[in-house]
Amino acid sequence: MMRIRFANVATIARREYLVRARTRSFKAATIFLVVAAVLVTLAPLAVRWFDRDSSAKVGVHVSTTLSFDPIARLDSTINLSATPGGRGPFTFSTVPDLAAGRDAVAKGDLSAVLDLARDPAGDLAFTIVSKDGPTLRIPTLLRQGSSVLATTDRLLRGGYPADKLDALGIPPSVVVVGPTPAEPGQAPKDFAGEIGSSLTGQALVIFLFIAIVLYGQWVAMSVAEEKSSRVMEIVLNAASPFELLAGKVVGVGSLGLTQYVAAIIPAGIALLLQDRIASLVLGEAAASTAPAASGLTPALLIAFAVLFVLGFLLYAVLYAAAGSLVSRMEDINSVVAPMTMVGMAGYLVAVYTSSGLIPADAGWVVVLSYVPFVSPYLMLSRFATGMAGPLDLALASALLVIAIVACLWVAARIYAAGVLTYGQKPGARALFTAAFARRG
Amino acid sequence: MSLQITDLRKRFGETRALDGITFGVEPGTVFGFLGANGAGKTTTMRIVLDILRADTGTVTWQGTPSTDLPRRTFGYLPEERGLYPRMQVLEQLVFFAGLYGVPRKTAAAEVRGWLARFRVPEYADRRAEELSKGNQQKIQFIAAVLHDPDVLIMDEPFSGLDPVNVALLKAAFLEMRGRGKTLIFSTHQMETVEELCDEVAIIDAGRLVANGPTADVKRASGKRVVRLGVAGDPELPWLAELDGVRVGRAGRDYSQIEVVPPRDPESLLHAAIAHGERVTRFEIADPSLEQIFVDLVGRQAAPDEERTLAHLPANGRA
């Protein structure tokens, strides 16, 4: 009968936590993470701040007669994102001479010149003068603008009232709904919100992967360090391998959680204050268009926390077992590689699923989202996009707990055998024997 | 009985490490556990400590199987020395004691006491990696005794120590014995065993080849040693004519001669006088433990080189 002394687990976890927390590298990494998290949170704001005065200058040359002002039409359509006081993607100006316009583009004074002429049938024909290829941003946007101008011209020539032109540009109401009718009182699916939760889901999956691999490696390194410094045998007289394993996982896990919380709290505060910072930096009006923290709901945060803790535990016990098999620190990477590969596969599928490259409702994705080792990533991704609910999360968590118990059982045996074994290459057969041999 | 080891057997793959080891250690004694490299000393110690499990056989202390004993019953100084290199000495010793349930304050006070006894009180705040090997060994000894164990098991405690530190450690041994503790240690320094140990066990290739009070083990072979000094030529050519006699050490001051029964050691004195030698020294003694060891094990004692300990699986205490 195995006796576990929780006091020993706590003592080992405490040492692991304190010794690591005091290292310079930990402090430096934590400060770096905090700064990085805040910067990443405020990055969209920073991009907008840098972009606030930069709009491409485009000249418009009219080689024909028009019954409307093309620049006003372009401003009210493709420059729609322009904010009062700020500017849209383009600043349009009239170019009286096409040759001078070409020169200005060649010199870089103008980004492009849009020339309006008429074809033999009387329709507007456009020429875009630009250094950029036809698929790049400026020509693409100007192509859209050209369609608007051509349509306007056709409408006016067909007798459409000129005073109703502006109303043409107002976007219609579009709602995307699922095949089953919405419950009474339930809001229809919000397209913008869905993009938000998909991005949030992707970000959380990336965080989860980095955390599991990084902190898992710490566990493996800590075990290998103890083994290579030969201190293991002293500890083993006082504590069982199981207690040592558990203490390490708990200690390093708590440390990881500390670092994570240290990074996430300032990032969260920055996120909450984003509107206020935006209004300070960009002005009141501009702030209203700052992207909100869409999709980051309390339910998703709870799901993330549950999957982070369970996913970390599952991988950490295996990382510890792997760490016990090497005698030298430099061999760690090769023994943890298989686990990192499995995690990477789950992570990639989850990221592709969140970004829509793989359909989130594909049968194999749904099945894999319950399979431990990959479920932390896939279930998080499905949960974030609303494809999975609390029950799915509960089922995946229950399966993870079962997997953790099973892995703990195997890992403790590999660990117990591994920690006192020096100089041997860990082969598959040796591992199997260690894990499943009858205990004396 | 006290620490009773009964019929221990252990295999590592094809290698038979222990082949039916049985012996007992009385409480409050100092016990020498001897054997050549790879004889099974470390394996036996690890089984006693329940770090390894035997294939068959039992270990009991005061009648309780070692697997059921509280961990603090034993203190262990392993052969493979190791400390946390970047941790301060005081902090890591308090950590080790904490694993045995010793409160932090008590442990810290004990550590300071021991450091003072070892004449290194200033090491408390140093990191282990800053200390010399010999000093690290002292720290490890403290780690083994801090929780006041009943039985102290030490694998090669004297290896790598200078004579001053050997003397300090011996004094610590005697103090522990004075407190009624049981000390078991392995070493290749036979003089130390003769000096400190009440009893010894010698194992060879996983088997017990001698066991008992140190003096009894030395006498059990029946051999005696005669130290014979003569004036003039130290060569004693006439010795070659005698049966049951072998010159162990020929020196200028005296020769050490092993005498095997049925020859009477005193007959050498008669023979010397009969050959006209002027005897300046004649002494009959037990053979040294070194000689007994070489006779029994057939090899010279030497420090263990680092060896691969075990084929998987090694441990049962998961």
Image (cartoon, rainbow, N blue to C red):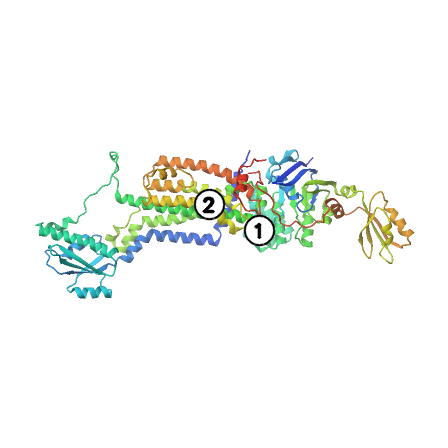
Left or right: A40 in relation to B275: left
Residue A338 is labelled as 2
* Residue A37 percent coordinates (x, y): 37, 51
- Helix, strand or loop for disc 1: helix
Q: Residue B89 carries which label?
A: 1
Establish if A215 lies above or below B67. below
Q: Mark 2 falls within which chain?
A: A
Badge 2 amino acid = Pro
Whole-percent x and y of residue A78?
A: 20, 53
| Residue located 38% across and 53% down the image | A36
Q: Nearer the viewer, residue B53 or B236?
A: B236
- Callouts 1 and 2 in the same chain: no
Q: What residue type is labelled 1?
A: Val
Percent across and percent down for residue B3 are: 67, 37
Q: Residue A149 falls in which quadrant of the image?
A: bottom left
Question: Which image quarter holds the N terminus of chain B?
Answer: top right
Contact check, label 1 and label 2, Cβ < 8 Å: no
Residues A244 and A267: in front is: A244
Considering depth in this image, is B86 or A349 the residue closer to the camera?
A349
- Residue at the far left: name it: A159
Q: Residues within 10 Å of mark 1 (few under 14, many from 20)?
A: many
Label annotation for residue A6: none
Q: What element carries label 2?
A: helix
- State the CA–CA distance, disc 1 to disc 2: 37 Å
Q: Relative to B13, does residue A155 appear above or below in the rendering?
A: below
Label 2, residues with CA under 10 Å away: few <14, some 14-19, many ≥20? few
Residue A244 at least partly seen: yes
Work out whether residue A79 can be spotted: no
Q: In which quarter of the image is the C terminus of chain B?
A: top right
Q: Mark 1 lies on which chain?
A: B
